[in-house]
Amino acid sequence: MLEIEGLSIGFRDVEPPLEVVRDFSLTMEPGEIVGVVGESGSGKTMTALALMGLLKSRARITSGRMMFEGRDLLTLSRKGWEEVRGKEISMIFQEPMTSLDPLLTIGRQMEESLRLHTDLDRRERKRRVLDMMEQVGLPQPEKLYGCYPHQLSGGMRQRVMIGAALITNTRLMVADEPTTALDVTIQAQILALLKKMNQEHGTAILFISHDLRVIRSICSRVVVMYRGEAVEMGSVEEVLSSPQADHTKQLIAAIPDRENRLRGGKERS
Amino acid sequence: MEKGFYRYNMVVGGILAGVMTVFMLVGLFYTPYDPETMDPFLKFAHASLAHPFGCDQFGRDIFSRVLQGSGTTFLVAVGTLAIGAGTGTFLGLATGYFGGWPDEAIMRFNDLIVAFPSILLALISISLLGPGKYNVILALGIVFIPSFARIVRSEVIVHKDMDYVKSARLMGVGHMRILFVHILPNIKGTLFSALAIGFNNAVLSEAGMSYLGIGVQPPDASIGRMMSEGQAYIFTAPWSILFPGVVMILMVLGFGLLSDGCGDRDA
């Protein structure tokens, strides 16, 4: 479904030219959840933005190929991108507190994609939105429909974002650190929701995170990025149980869980 | 104290601006006496029930003239804002959002206009176009473009990188829709307060130009012109300059307070 091959992204207007993503390749099958893990600045978000055609104008794709369902994304026109974005590929961010327009009601924001990409009339759109609110676990959809973002908690806003991203039955959702800004219990709920939506709608998810624990709980495959390069790729179990790259080992060692603490204690004693 | 203080500003400003707007609107359509009719028996008549603001050196009813004059002022101010704020907002949206060399070119041209004393610029335009209500609107309108362009531009630059705009882009929203449906409503607080200040400046500029004799021309009454005419009688008949002055102060005060209130509510 998605095929990224030898993607490089760089800034050309600085001296010396800076390459932030080097020779990145990734394939995704429909309905798959693939994780991208790496420290801050490793090029995860740049890759995601390139996939959405939203790189800042200073950043350029210097080489590589991106195919989505047989279409070459790199040759799309502006109009072409506007057709793909939101309809076939959507994205959610880390910060659910700021990702919603403060002056538009929840219902209005969730129906934006429908408004842009379908010919549904107002009543039909509202029905779809209410239905989606139900699916993403927002209580009292009728009441929330007319609420403004500031009246909702962070977890609820992230549910709204997920609902808005999936309402047009998108084929692929890019989730850029969607749980990082949430506390642990809400984080678990959102992960469960993403998994549920993935199973029910068959939407593939490219899950970007710096947290291997989160990746482990939701992804089937994982790509480890370090300084703009994919240093390791494979199924989650494989990568976690027998990491090959040094950086992967460091990331695993950085998981503050019980086993690690015990192991650390043994070594010291 | 801060919050209450500003809310108080907003309420007082709102009421005052509202009353003055009604006053100006009435002045466009109705005056108790014909503002042009001269009556030698009423020359410098004191304020009375029949003539609440008294009469001027030609025996014209000052209240009627102030009413009509503020109507003219209102028209000029609104026209100026329509041109200045309309064009300025449009330029600010475009340059702030798209950036690049058009932004650079337009903003430098903006700087050029700003670097010129605005009253001088208006004077030049008037000497090219000739005096009169509509030319004043055009001249002031052009002078007002840069400030709106700059205010809107800086707000757009702040908002265009916010996550909600990014999310909208990610849903496939086009540039025009982002600008007018997503960004513009979010900067309207700032825009309103700039509009209220702009209205004030337009009122004062029009009065200033009319005072200098290059603004509104007879037979149209204007507050600025009344003050310039009344100046000669400031000691013998102070009411002929006092009342137009007071009306203008109330007008400017009302919109000024309103602007303060708007700005705070937005913050």
Image: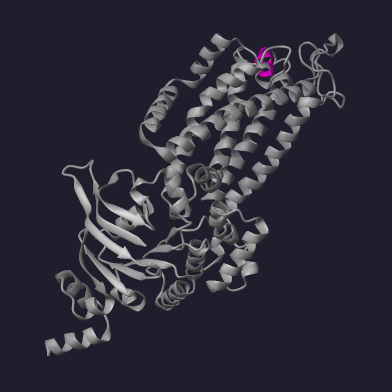
- For the stretch drawn in magenta, the main secondary structure is helix
The answer to whether residue A254 is left or right of residue B107 is left
Q: Do we see residue B151 in this rendering?
A: no
Frontmost residue, A111 versus B185: A111
Quarter of the image containing the N terminus of chain B?
Answer: bottom right
In this picture, which residue range is highlighted in magenta? B226-232
The answer to whether residue B43 is left or right of residue A1 is right
Frontmost residue, A74 versus A16: A74
Which image quarter: residue B194? top right
Residue A232: where, in percent of width, then height? 20, 68
Residue A108: where, in percent of width, then height? 59, 57
Frontmost residue, A71 versus B98: A71
Image position of B193 with respect to A245: above or below: above
The answer to whether residue A8 is left or right of residue B159 is left
Frontmost residue, A124 versus A45: A124
Q: Do we see residue B202 in this rendering?
A: yes
Please say whether residue A73 is one of the residues in the magenta stretch: no
Image position of B52 with respect to A262: above or below: above
| Colour scheme in use | one colour
Residue A99: where, in percent of width, then height? 46, 58
